[in-house]
Amino acid sequence: MIPSLLTSIVVAFTFSLSGGQSGVNVQGSAVIRDEANYVIVASPMEIHSVDGVTYVVDNQAKEVYIQESVGIDLSQVPDLLGSRKQLKGSYTDPASGQKFKYVLDGIVKITLEESEPLSDFNVDSLSEEWIVTDLR
C-alpha cells in the first residue's frame, strides 16, 4: 500500500480581496487542491474548477458558465502550504494585469483521498429555471 500516492493536501481558508480597476471588495472562502482543482465561494458567486473545467455559478441570477479552466497561479501566493495561519500580499491577474490585495485567514491543511472530490456541484442537478452557458 502506498498511501502517499493516494492522498493529497488540500488548503482551506477564508479570504478578502480588494483592488483592481473597479475597486473590487470581496470576502469568501476557498478550498484548493492544486492549480486546476479548487472551490471558491463569495456569495452569491461560486467557482468550481475540476480537472480543467471551470463552472462559474451565480446563485442569485441562477446562471452557470462552463469554460476551460485557466487555473490559478499559486506561485503568486507564497507560503500557502507553509505553517502560517494568515497570509497577506498582492496578486496580479494574468489575464487582465489588474493588481489585487489579499488576506488569507484561518489557513488549515487537510489530507483527502485523491478520489474524493472537492465539490459536489453538478449541472445536471439544477432545475430548469437555471441558465447554463457552455463556453468551451
Image (cartoon, grey):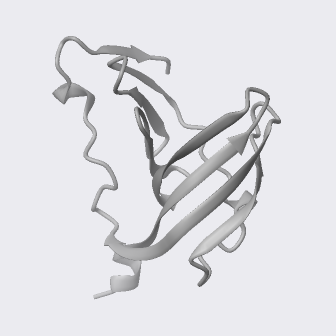
33 or 47, nearer to the observer: 47
The residue positioned 25% from the left and 46% from the top of the image is: 120
- The percent position of residue 130, horizontal first and vertical second, equals 27, 15
From the viewer's perspective, is 114 left or right of 78?
left
Q: Is residue 16 above or below residue 82?
A: above
* Residue 110, quarter of the rendered image: bottom left
The residue positioned 63% from the left and 39% from the top of the image is: 25
59 or 116, nearer to the observer: 59
From the viewer's perspective, is 136 left or right of 64?
right
76 or 34, nearer to the observer: 76
Please identify the quadrant where the N terminus is shown. bottom left
* Residue 65, quarter of the rendered image: top left
- The percent position of residue 42, horizontal first and vertical second, equals 46, 41
Numbered label tally: 0
73 or 26, nearer to the observer: 26
- The percent position of residue 103, horizontal first and vertical second, equals 64, 59
- The percent position of residue 136, horizontal first and vertical second, equals 49, 21
The residue positioned 25% from the left and 35% from the top of the image is: 122
From the viewer's perspective, is 70 left or right of 21?
left
The residue positioned 48% from the left and 63% from the top of the image is: 13
Farthest residue, direction bottom = 1
